[in-house]
């Protein structure tokens, strides 16, 4: 990822706030994809809005890798995880597009409102594909106000070029989404 195309850490406060719970209910959004004991990657986790909820969902034996390219975001995730009582289930990981590496295979990966910020989407999807278990799922969600249906279609083609198959196109508020599967 190029830091010039990435949402600055301080801007995250504008959309990662209590009002968001009216639009994005993580437990409802991920209930068919994530269960207790799963290993999950929240790629581009930002301040941890989804990481915290995912950690509650994978308890007592699962874990969430909260991955971001900005240290400020990961510091905020750590503080929020402690406050939410899930710090033992969240592992923060500083990364970049060029060094995105999964420390272990994951069952489910989330890329929420961030794929459009990557330069080489096929390469990025290949890295995610490599990190998923067989039949692992990747939920890609992009902001409707910023990413067109055609742009999402281009992202889906990049994902398919990396080996993914489209499993579903879930409806997520304010977003364009696709659920991809590693077959």
Image: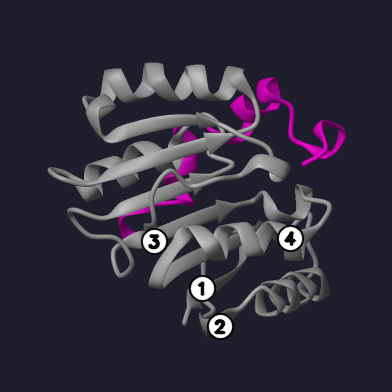
Q: Which residue is mark 4?
A: 123
Q: Which residue is mark 1?
A: 179
In magenta stretch: residue 119: no
- Which callout, 3 or 4, points to the residue nearer the camera? 4
Above or below residue 70? Residue 106 is below
CA distance for labels 2 and 4:
18 Å
Q: Which residue is mark 3?
A: 29
CA distance for labels 1 and 4:
18 Å
**Magenta segment, which residues?**
1-28
Q: Earlier in the sequence, mark 1 or mark 2?
A: 2
Q: Which residue is mark 2?
A: 166
16 horizontally vs 33: left or right: right
Above or below residue 174? Residue 137 is below
Rendered residue at 23%/28% (across/down): 88
Above or below residue 25? Residue 8 is above
Q: Are marks 2 and 3 in contact (CB under 8 Å)?
A: no
**Callout 3 secondary element:** helix
Give residue 29's position: percent from left, percent from top.
39, 61
Q: Earlier in the sequence, mark 3 or mark 4?
A: 3
Q: Are marks 1 and 2 in contact (CB under 8 Å)?
A: yes
1 horizontally vs 24: left or right: right
- Which callout, 1 or 3, points to the residue nearer the camera? 1
Which residue ends up furthest to the left in the rendered image?
Answer: 60
Rendered residue at 79%/74% (across/down): 154
């Amino acid at each position: 990822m190029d830091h010039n195309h990435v949402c600055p850490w301080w801007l995250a406060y504008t959309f990662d706030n209590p009002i968001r719970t009216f639009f994005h209910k993580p437990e409802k959004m991920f209930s068919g994809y994530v269960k207790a004991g799963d290993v999950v990657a929240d790629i581009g986790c930002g301040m941890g809005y989804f990481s915290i909820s995912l950690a509650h969902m994978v308890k007592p034996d699962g874990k969430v890798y909260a991955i971001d390219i900005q240290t400020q975001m990961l510091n905020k995730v750590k503080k929020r995880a402690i406050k939410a009582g899930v710090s033992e289930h969240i592992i923060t990981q500083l990364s970049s597009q060029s060094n995105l590496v999964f420390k272990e295979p994951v069952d489910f990966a989330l890329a929420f409102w961030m794929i459009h910020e990557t330069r080489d989407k096929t390469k990025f999807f290949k890295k995610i594909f490599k990190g998923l278990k067989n039949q692992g799922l990747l939920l890609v969600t992009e902001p409707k106000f910023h990413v067109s249906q055609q742009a999402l279609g281009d992202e889906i083609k990049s994902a398919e070029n990396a080996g993914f198959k489209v499993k579903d196109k879930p409806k997520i508020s304010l977003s364009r989404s696709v659920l991809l599967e590693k077959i």
